[in-house]
Image (cartoon, rainbow, N blue to C red):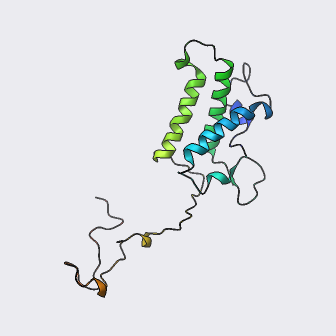
């Protein structure tokens, strides 16, 4: 289940000079891009990433590949293809393929550190945690078992902070 197909990658290439003619010719670059993306994001989207597919129609529980992930995969595919074709250029730091790969990797880094979010998916929370699962929270009160606490009395809120309060 590739995250992007050859036509997505061709959007990042000059189709006059260099383009993937078909899906078979893009398999190696697609596999490499998918491995990098899935490896980088497996712990960020553990419940979603193995459901993402670029295939149509979707068969539940499959999910469509988020648009940004498809673009990152396409960028990496194009970058790998470009670098393979023009690997003999002497100044690699200004190479379009290298710059495209760096851009894709910056996006993956942003997804990992939370500075970039995927807006077109619902994140599955397999643990089902809610605010009430974190203690203390805004609904926690002092119970009879806590009578030896210094400070709040039975029935009073047991909190020294509030979940919604910004410091």
Q: Farthest residue in the left direction?
A: 150
Query: Image point 55% across, 49% down: which residue?
Result: 118
Image coords of residue 153 (percent x, y): 23, 83
Residue 156 is left or right of residue 69, and the answer is left
User: Based on the displayed image, in which of its 4 quarters is residue 80 positioned?
Assistant: top right
User: Based on the displayed image, in which of its 4 quarters is residue 143 positioned?
Assistant: bottom left
Q: How many numbered marks appear? A: 0
Query: Image point 43% across, 69% down: which residue?
Result: 131
Image coords of residue 97 (percent x, y): 60, 24
Tell me the quarter of the image containing the C terminus. bottom left
The answer to whether residue 54 is above or below residue 152 is above
The answer to whether residue 165 is above or below residue 34 is below
Q: Farthest residue in the bottom direction?
A: 144
**Foreground residue, 157 or 42?**
42
The answer to whether residue 12 is above or below residue 126 is above
Image coords of residue 13 (percent x, y): 68, 26
Q: Farthest residue in the top direction?
A: 90
- Visible residue check, residue 12: no
Image coords of residue 46 (percent x, y): 58, 54
- Visible residue check, residue 135: yes
Query: Image point 53% across, 68% down: which residue?
Result: 128
**Foreground residue, 86 or 11?**
86
**Foreground residue, 14 or 97?**
97
Query: Image point 72% across, 22% down: which residue?
Result: 18
Residue 106 is left or right of residue 15, and the answer is left
């Amino acid at each position: 289940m590739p995250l992007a197909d050859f036509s997505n990658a061709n959007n990042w290439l000059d189709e006059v000079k260099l383009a993937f003619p078909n899906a078979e010719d893009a398999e190696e670059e697609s596999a490499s891009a998918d491995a990098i993306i899935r490896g980088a994001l497996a712990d960020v989207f553990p419940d979603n990433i193995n459901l993402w597919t670029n295939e149509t129609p979707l068969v539940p529980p499959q999910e469509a590949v988020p648009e940004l992930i498809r673009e990152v995969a396409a960028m990496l595919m194009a970058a790998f293809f470009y670098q393979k074709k023009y690997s003999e250029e002497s100044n690699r730091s200004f190479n379009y393929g290298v710059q495209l790969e760096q851009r894709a990797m910056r996006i993956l880094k942003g997804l990992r550190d939370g500075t970039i979010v995927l807006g077109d998916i619902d994140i599955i929370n397999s643990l089902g945690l809610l605010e009430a699962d974190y203690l203390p929270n805004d609904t926690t009160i002092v119970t009879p078992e806590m009578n030896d606490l210094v400070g709040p009395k039975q029935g009073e809120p047991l909190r020294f902070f509030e979940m919604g309060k910004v410091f």
